[in-house]
Amino acid sequence: MARNLGGAIIDLLESERVALRAAAATVLAAVGKGDKAVESALTERLADDDGEVRRIALEGLADMGAAGIAANLVPLLHGDDEVLAERAAQVLAQQGAAAEGTLRKEISSGPVAARRVMAQLLLRRGTQPAIDAVLDQLSDGEFGEQALQLVRAELDQGNDRLGNQVEKSAIERASLANRELGKAWTRAQKAAADAEKLAAKAQKAKPKKGAKASNGANGANGHHVSADPLRDPDVAKGMAELGALLRLIGYLARPATQSLLLKYADPEEPRPIRLAAIAGLRRIVATSEARGTEKCVEALIEYADGDDLAVAQSAIDTLRGARIPESLAKTFAGLAKSKNSAAQKLAMERMPAGGGASAVKALVEALGGDEPTSRDAAARGLSKAPESVLPVTRALLATKDEQAARRYAGVLRSHRGNISNQAIEELVERIREYMDVHGKGKATADQIVLERVLGELIADIAPAMHVELLFERAKRLRKQGKSVEAFGSLKPLLRSRADIDTAIDDEQRFFLALLSLEAAGEGLIRTTRTDDPVFEQFSRLAAKGYPVAKQLAREKDVSDEALYALGFRLLESGDGSNEELGAELLQGIIDERPRSKLAKAAKNKLKLTGHGDD
């Protein structure tokens, strides 16, 4: 009875009604585990016209753990139902060794998406036949690149076992592919030569009246024969396969394969093969643990400076991440003078330590040049090279161009804190020369600008020297009777309270205050600002116990009127310490010139403020 019922349900799977087929599949999936007839019936339903029936059948077979159904699952990968295809791939993965033969057979055809899934499943299997089935796809114009990237992704997971299998197979395949490519190349060259002979013969022959001239570029079968072997289909396919294998060998980053890849990078090889081999070297020369890369790196440097721009760019891209051996540092730095601007940029950005004076010189020249890209690259390279400080300093001192000077100054700022005393001394000496010329009124507009550039640089890299230079300029101006200009030259120090507190000593502070007093003159008595620099600096000195009044009394260029004005304003400040200093200044006037009008005014002011004698 049960057997008859089961058979009846299986028969319903052939019904024209979708609902009945779906219901039958659902029942069988639930109760048919272990029944071969049920498994066979559900397996047939994997090809059902209805997607829901296929889904029920697939889930039922998966739950049953049905084996031997790989050939029926692969078509699901080719369908339009992505969800069903993904589930079919999962079930295929569970089929294990039983599915491998089917996957190896089916991977060479069908939609790319399905082939990707099959390649992934085969790589996970990890057997040599499975791996070889994937490597067989590398020459496929539609799927070859994706197959290569799938293998690369698996290798990047650190699967050493897979790496060893791939290395052995890829090297053997590369040798075979190279031989086959050689044969195809020879055939293509012969065909091209024959075509040229036919064309020459046709040109010499005089066609009969009304007859068409023969096209010597056509072969015996009427197909066009290209004079360029690279356009031959067999050659193109061989190039694609060998190129993919070389890149794959490079992905393994095995130092032992250097010589193989370097052989295929030789200028005698076709460009596509050279490009693949150079790309294959990328990981090897970038590995810090790699040994014996000198020959590879030396060849790449040569290619980077070559006439073939495509090969040169590939070499540059490979060198960009390469570990440059110390023995080749100077050779690499020589690219800074390459005729290839991209190679110049690379050398300038990556100039290794040990590049030598010639490398630094090339970068300095590029930084002062007219080509923006080279200038930017040179700036980055010099900023990373401490040995460039003195050459850049001297280039800065030699230039007459403001923009070049600012670029050199920018590089020196990047080495702030590591600039030698010699470099600073040379910069300061030049500033003093400019100051001397400027002080005599003989400075040109260019000299004034360059002096400003150097002054700004010294302010950044040697603040103490900058302060010293400012005071030297101010003293020179004051000696010339230009107190206002002298005070103006020191005004940059007043921009930051923190800077002036740490940058100057008491004598310099007094000089600054003295200049501000001379610049303000009698007009000081009319100011209402209590934060005026005159008050600020004298007040700070007095608070520290500095003999302000006594020092001011010694200054012959400070008029009694200016002293009176300062004393008057300090008394008016409302600050106790300031008032004491103000009273001391006014009393000094009284003591020195008791009969003067200012002495009388001073006595009155002291009396009014409660600081005079009763």
Image: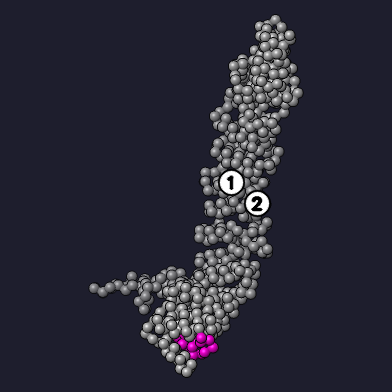
Observer-side mark, 1 or 2, equals 1
Q: Secondary structure at mark 1?
A: helix
Report the side of 30 relative to 20 (left or right).
Answer: right
Tell me if I can see residue 194 in this picture.
Answer: yes
Which quadrant holds residue 390?
top right
Amino acid tagged 1: Ala
Residue that lies at the very extreme toward the front in this rendered image: 1
Residue at left 41%, top 87%? 12
Residue at left 55%, top 56%? 305
Give residue 355's mark.
Answer: 2
Residue that lies at the very extreme toward the top in this rendered image: 595
Q: Is residue 512 above or below residue 405?
A: above
Tell me where residue 162 appears, x and y as whole percent: 61, 74
Q: CA distance from mark 1 to mark 2?
A: 16 Å
Q: Secondary structure at mark 2?
A: loop
Tell me where residue 354 appears, x and y as whole percent: 67, 52
Image quarter of the C terminus: top right
Marked residue nearer the N-terminal end (1 or 2): 2
Tell me where residue 98 appears, x and y as whole percent: 55, 84
Which quadrant holds residue 301?
bottom right
Amino acid tagged 2: Gly
Q: Residues within 10 Å of mark 2 (few under 14, many from 20)?
A: many
Report the side of 519 relative to 181 (left or right).
Answer: right
Inspect the magenta stretch and tell me whether residue 39 lies in it.
Answer: yes
Query: Which residues, given as a range, are shown in magenta?
Result: 31-45
Tell me where residue 191 appears, x and y as whole percent: 42, 75
Give residue 379's mark.
Answer: 1
Inspect the magenta stretch and tell me whether residue 524 lies in it.
Answer: no
Q: Is residue 160 above or below residue 39?
A: above
Q: Main secondary structure of the magenta part?
A: helix
